[in-house]
Image (cartoon, rainbow, N blue to C red):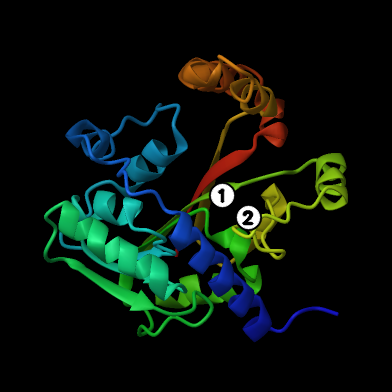
Amino acid sequence: MEPSLQEWEQVERERSAHEALQTLSTDPLEAPKNVARYLNPPSDTIYPLEYACHLLGDVSGKTILEYGCGDGVNTVLLANRGAKVISLDLSAELVDIARRRLQVHGITSGVDFIVGSAHDVPLPDASVDVVFGIAILHHLDLALSAREVHRLLKKGGIAIFQEPVRNSRLMRAFRKLVPNRSPDISPFERPLTDQELKDFAGNSSSYHSRPFTLPTSTLLTMLPGLHDSSAKFLAWDARMLSSFPPLEYFSSVKVISMTK
């Protein structure tokens, strides 16, 4: 039996509450250079989050809806770009951490938080210029969230998402056979497919997708002594994906953008 939306979101709240408890006190953006790298990244960056930030362009004076702000790491990056930011998350616990993170970074204005559902955002139609979400869609009912994103965007507005992807039927079947029962992973989240992302953008006037990360490099970084070589592996992936476009099918991360 399919879960109701209320059951689905309650499970996500519980997962997020556990994630909030596990959030480290150290801040990945503590060093100023870790914020600066996302202000104007190049189009050919090998890092998906940098590329998502590149797609934002100049957002000074615009309104960005951060769709699933989590613990606020990306909120800090958005707040430093001169936009009005509305950060939404289902978890009150994570939003509380996000507020405290802004205080640590000296950000006292330009960001409003909403604790609420991404399936039913309490904002007017056509009220935001940009919807920005990092690893959020794979937690959601895609049909409902697609309607919300389309409703909220102004005409000509853009939505940018970074999502885990798994197109291989074999790998998806294997994942079902070996379920991860970690409390910070809900039973409803799942990697998406290219087709699901295209369907999500079905009402858009334009759609673009860029692949990142091949499974081999992900596995290699898990081996002892190779974690520090992750940048080299990402660079290798970028070269392979550029030289052999059919490999895109096997990429495990996609950054997509769509225009209303």
Q: Is any part of residue 242 visible from this angle?
A: yes
- Mark 2 vs mark 1, foreground winner is 1
Q: At 66% from the left edge and 32% from the top edge, which residue is drawn? A: 248
Residue 197 numbered tag? 2
Q: Is any part of residue 259 visible from this angle?
A: no
Query: At which x and y percent is residue 197?
Result: 63, 55
The quarter of the displayed image where residue 63 is located:
bottom left
Q: At 17% from the left edge and 54% from the top edge, which residue is drawn? A: 104
Q: Secondary structure at mark 2?
A: helix
Image mark count: 2
Label 2 vs label 1: CA separation?
9 Å
Residue 163 numbered tag? 1
Query: At which x and y percent is residue 94?
Result: 40, 66
Query: Depth check: 207 or 26 in front?
Result: 26
Look at label 2 and name its amino acid: Leu
Query: At which x and y percent is residue 19?
Result: 50, 59
- At label 2, counting other C-alpha atoms closer than 10 Å, the crowd grade (few under 14, some 14-19, many 20 or more) is many
Look at label 1 and name its amino acid: Glu
